[in-house]
Image: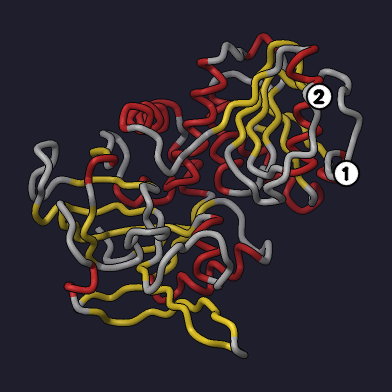
Amino acid sequence: MIQAVVVYEVPSDGKPKRVARLEEVEESFLGDGMTVVDVAYSGINYKDALALTGRPGVVKKTPLVAGIDLVGTVVSSGDDRFSPGDWLVLNGAGQSETRHGGLATRAHVDPALAVTLPAGITPARAAALGTAGYTAALAVARLKREGVAPENGPVLVTGATGGVGSIAILLLARAGFEVAALTGRADEHGEYLRGLGAMHLVDRDDLAEQGRPLQSARWAGVVDAVGGHVLANALAATKPGGTVAACGLAGSADLPATVMPFILRGVTLAGIDSVWAPLAARREAWELLARDLDLDTLDSLTEEVSLDGAINASERLLAGDAHGRIRVSVSGA
């Protein structure tokens, strides 16, 4: 039997409602998969929190094992890149959307987008990074590829106390960037953000409402995990030739912006797709994390919960009572 956190759709007042619960399932419940993995760790990201608390927009079919991240050892492999006993990491790739995910003691996966656990990163730390860390690395790599450099000026990170924001600040500060962190609770989280490497704190209220379509040019680049007016205002305040990497919608999926930053300043809006990023981009992101991230600092901003604590951790994350990273110990390592 497999221990798994499964999302179901149940009737409620005449309307379907999503619920998640920890239970035992037969391995046949997992369906076919080219590669069988014993899962050691998963994690709680923003999308996991939405799925585990019954919010719409993540889980596309039910019943489905939740967990968009998976770190584990190969039991049997249908891919020449992996052999039994190898450690692999799989982020996104439809997990917890249309495919069973990592919040289970065993998984049947398509390994096409899985990467080998990078040298120098333990399985526990890989899970602590998870989709949030991998997405942050994709965004930072994209800024660098677009020519954003420390000498161009400060880089803004929105959603700064979240998983993506926290890891992005660490990576940018380590690379020599002057980092500004957007937060709505500077008094509460200021010390935490400065400890990650942020040099400036920006009040979220300054970007929360509709602003002018073109504003004072402040940012050489932006890593945005919020969307909505925050993203629109960040674009309007980006320097000529700058790049904004959009990788989340914690605030809103809307983009109430104009074309003016693009046609008058040559600003680039770069979308970051962490779910279906190609294997080469995944490898680049994980190599960046293994090379440039201060793993001791990662440990200090990570909390660990057991599989039966995943749902409660999701509720705390959405309530704003958790920041940094939440790792789920499924079977340990």
> Where, quadrant-wise, is the C terminus in this rendering?
bottom left
Task: Name the residue that disc number 1 marks.
Answer: 209
Q: Position of residue 216 (x, y in %)?
A: 88, 20
> Residue 62 bears which disc, if any?
none
Reply above or below: 122 against 201: below
Residue projecting furthest to the front? 14
Side of 44 where 102 appears, left or right = left
**Front in this rendered view, residue 178 or 30:** 30
- Residue type marked 2: Ala
Q: Residue at x 51, y 66 (%)?
A: 51
Instruction: Give the mark, 2 or 1, whose residue is nearer the N terminus.
Output: 1
Q: CA distance from mark 2 to mark 1?
A: 14 Å
Q: Nearer the viewer, residue 158 or 187?
A: 158
Tell me which residue sits at (36%, 45%) in the image. Answer: 126
Outermost residue, bottom direction? 13
Image point 63% across, 20% down: which residue? 177
* Mark linked to residue 237: 2
Residue appearing at x 79%, y 33% in the figure = 257
Q: Position of residue 304 (x, y in %)?
A: 44, 62
Coordinates of residue 153 in the picture (x, y in percent): 72, 15
User: Along the horizontal axis of the image, is 12 left or right of 265?
Assistant: left
